[in-house]
Amino acid sequence: MHKNKKETITQDQNISFLRRFAVRSVALLAAVIGVVILFDPFYRYHAPLPGLKAVLSDKEYQCVGTLRNFDYDALIVGSSVCENYNNHWFDEGFGCTAIKAIRSYGATADLCYLLDKAYESHELKYVFYNIDPSSLSASTEPTYEATNCPMYLYDRSFFNDYPYWLNKGVLLEKIPYMLAYSLIGNYDEGDSYNWAQWKYFGQDLAIGMYTRLPDVKQMQPENTNAEELAGNIALLTAQVEAHPDTTFKFFFSPYSMLWWDNAYRNGERDAVIYNETQAIGALLAYDNAEIYFYQDDEDIITDLDNYMDMIHFSKDINYDIYDKLAKGEGRLTEENYTKRLEQMRTLSERIVQEDILQYYAK
């Protein structure tokens, strides 16, 4: 049975329509991918286009791209307490071009992972590295994959980037956000990942965010985390050894007296001080490593108006730390570091026995 002419024409029209639809769909898809690659708000492929600023607010998505594609010779490395530094402070104070390598948890393995990404394509004059106490007892395995970070943005293959290319949020939110901050207003690129704007800092908030244990636990042995500590020290010293032309400026930030009260009541205080003492002693063996200690800044840590919780301090404190680093203040040496750590132990005793009592009964 032969098809009539009308049926043949209808079939030809359908085929033609499908071909046009396919071509237009492919063209639209290519255009979407092209726009994402061109503007590249996660800096996966390149630095900002001329005339656009580096608008950085999503560290899990942007940090690795900036480490690979930006022009810099210094890194500010650390946890969320480092996000409120302005990179330009370090540029001016140390004669460098600094960007941030940030991981909220601040675990040693994660931060060393970021350092490795940076060293793949850059030589660094300085690494300004904040050591969080918890990082010395953390796992020595990076946590990016386990915490569902976008690993397609971390590897070297572009063939699995389709979640980035075909992402409505990227196209309709991230790119307009980047363009708006680049072309409108006075966005400061040095404030990358900054979260302090519009945040409130004060003793009422800090105390309200602190859940104090009703009872004091037995103090743990100093070497409770000996295996993890050894592994994390090895990760740090391996970075220092592998890059002798980089000056590593390690520093310990001033956590509030609430944090020290919590460490004492949890039975962790002695292990914390032991871990720090061991790490500092190991790092001081290297000529290209400097260590600065600000945990015992009594005026800062006992003034809860500087904090929004027991750890996170205001941007004014970030500047104070930067300023002391630039002036070389608070530096530890082979001769003074054990004494400074013992003074920190004494200060923590006074905190839990006296200073904290203005807020809590003994």
Image (cartoon, rainbow, N blue to C red):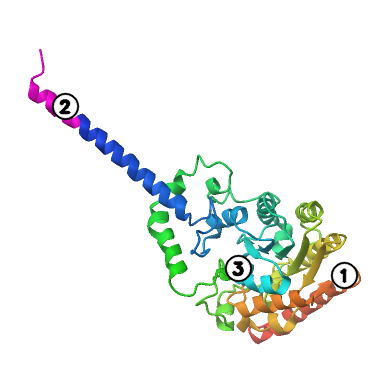
Please indicate, yes or no, whether residue 186 appears anywhere in the rendered image.
Answer: yes
Residue lying at 62% horizontally and 51% vertically, measured from the top left: 143
Return the residue at label 1. 333
Viewer-side residue, 258 vs 159:
159
Label 1 crowding class (10 Å Cα cut-off): few <14, some 14-19, many 20+?
some
Disc 2 from disc 3: Cα separation: 62 Å
* Place of residue 88 in the rendered image (x, y in percent of width and height, measured from the top left): 63, 72
Q: Is residue 47 left or right of residue 121?
A: left
Circle 2 sits on which residue? 11
Amino acid at dot 2:
Gln
At x 73% / y 67%, what residue is drawn? 267
Residue 307 as seen in the image, left or right of residue 134:
left
Label 1 is placed on what type of residue? Thr
First in residue order: circle 3 vs circle 1: 3
Q: Position of residue 328 (x, y in %)?
A: 79, 75
Which region of the structure is painted magenta? 1-14
Q: Which of 126 and 352 is in front in this view?
A: 126
Residue 10 in magenta stretch: yes
- Please name the residue that numbered disc 3 is placed on: 83
- Left or right position of 316 against 41: right
Tell me the kind of residue under disc 3. Answer: Glu
User: Which mark is nearer the camera, 2 or 1?
Assistant: 2
* Mark drawn on residue 46: none
Q: Position of residue 196 (x, y in %)?
A: 55, 74
Closer to the chain start, of discs 2 and 1, is 2
Q: Quadrant of residue 336?
A: bottom right
For the question of whether residue 219 can be seen, the reply is: no
User: Does the magenta-highlighted stretch encompass residue 21?
Assistant: no
In this view, the residue farthest toward the front is 50
Q: Mostly what secondary structure, the magenta segment?
A: helix
- Image position, residue 265 (x, y; %): 70, 71
